Image (cartoon, rainbow, N blue to C red):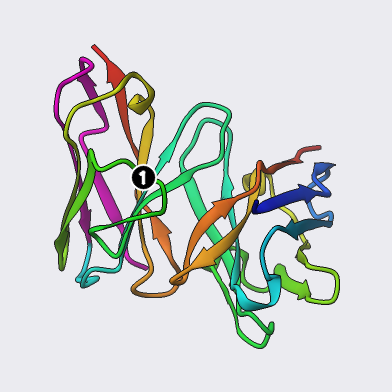
Amino acid sequence: EVQLLESGGGLVQPGGSLRLSCAASGFTFTTYRMSWVRQAPGKGLEWVSLISESGDMTFYTDSVKGRFTISRDNSRNTLHLQMNNLRVEDTAVYYCARNFHWIPDYWGQGTLVTVSS
Amino acid sequence: EIVLTQSPATLSLSPGERATLSCRASQSITTLLAWYQQKPGQAPRLLIYDASNRATGIPARFSGSGSGTDFSLTISSLEPEDFAIYYCHQRSKWPQTFGQGTQVEIK
């Protein structure tokens, strides 16, 4: 069974940093691209970032470029999202997702990031 | 960035009725469109990929069609568990984007 478990969310002040992690199990992690997708409270889905199987290719939505970094540790079956210079508008539930045909297929349950002073 | 516009925003129907949801792209995305279902408090679930292919385990009452800029998701006969929010998603160009969602509610 595919399982994705996010962690690392919490309350942070504007300008602060957080590192999200996603522990994957139930599939061969090294053979799948992985993504982060977020959802602000009461709003729709927003695609954030994607990383290739080996980690050599990364993609970001414009609003997080230069502030967020996606990475993966294939030895530990773990996906990360380093978030720096956080803004109030980054407040959201962040979902980790496995990719099939370059699109999210299995999703975790999400971790809430709240950016507020 | 490619903008996906979904219509209607809300669809009020009764169980057993047919639901047709629309997604229009701001430029051609060939057939690189997916559909997701999300229920309150849950993560999204992949329904359809590449415009018309059902994902694993998705019932046959869900079907997708379209190409270029105009796409639709049809639920042939609504079951009680189908009342949810539906999102379209494109992977044709970076960044990937989602539509704003269509809520299918019980009439």
Q: Is residue B39 left or right of residue A13?
A: left
Residue under the image location 43 percent in, 71 percent down: A101
Task: Tell me which segment is drawn in magenta.
Answer: B1-25
Residue under the image location 16 percent in, 34 percent down: B76
**Residue type highlighted by circle 1:** Ile
Q: In which quarter of the image is the C terminus of chain B?
A: top left
Q: Which image quadrant for residue A19?
A: bottom right
| Magenta-drawn stretch contains A75 | no
Q: Name the secondary structure under disc 1.
A: loop
Residue B43, given in percent of the width and then of the height, sits at 56, 40
Q: From this viewpoint, which residue is outermost toward the top?
A: B107
Q: From this viewpoint, which residue is outermost toward the bottom?
A: A56
Which is the main secondary structure of the residues drawn in magenta? strand
Residue A9 lies, with reference to residue A51, above or below; the image says above
Q: Quadrant of the N terminus of chain B?
A: bottom left
Q: In this view, does B96 lie to the left or right of B78?
A: right
Residue under the image location 80 percent in, 57 percent down: A21
Residue B5 lies, with reference to residue B79, above or below; the image says below
Residue under the image location 50 percent in, 52 percent down: A46
* Chain letter of the residue carrying label 1: B
Q: How crowded is mark 1: few (under 14 residues within 10 Å), some or many (20 or more)?
A: some
Residue A16, given in percent of the width and then of the height, sits at 84, 54
Residue A51, given in percent of the width and then of the height, sits at 62, 75
Q: Camera-side residue: A57 or B43? A: B43
Residue B86 lies, with reference to residue B32, above or below; the image says above
Residue under label 1, please give it: B58
| Magenta-drawn stretch contains B20 | yes
Residue A39, given in percent of the width and then of the height, sits at 56, 43
Residue A54 lies, with reference to residue A28, above or below; the image says below
Q: Which image quadrant for residue B13?
A: top left
Count of residue discs: 1
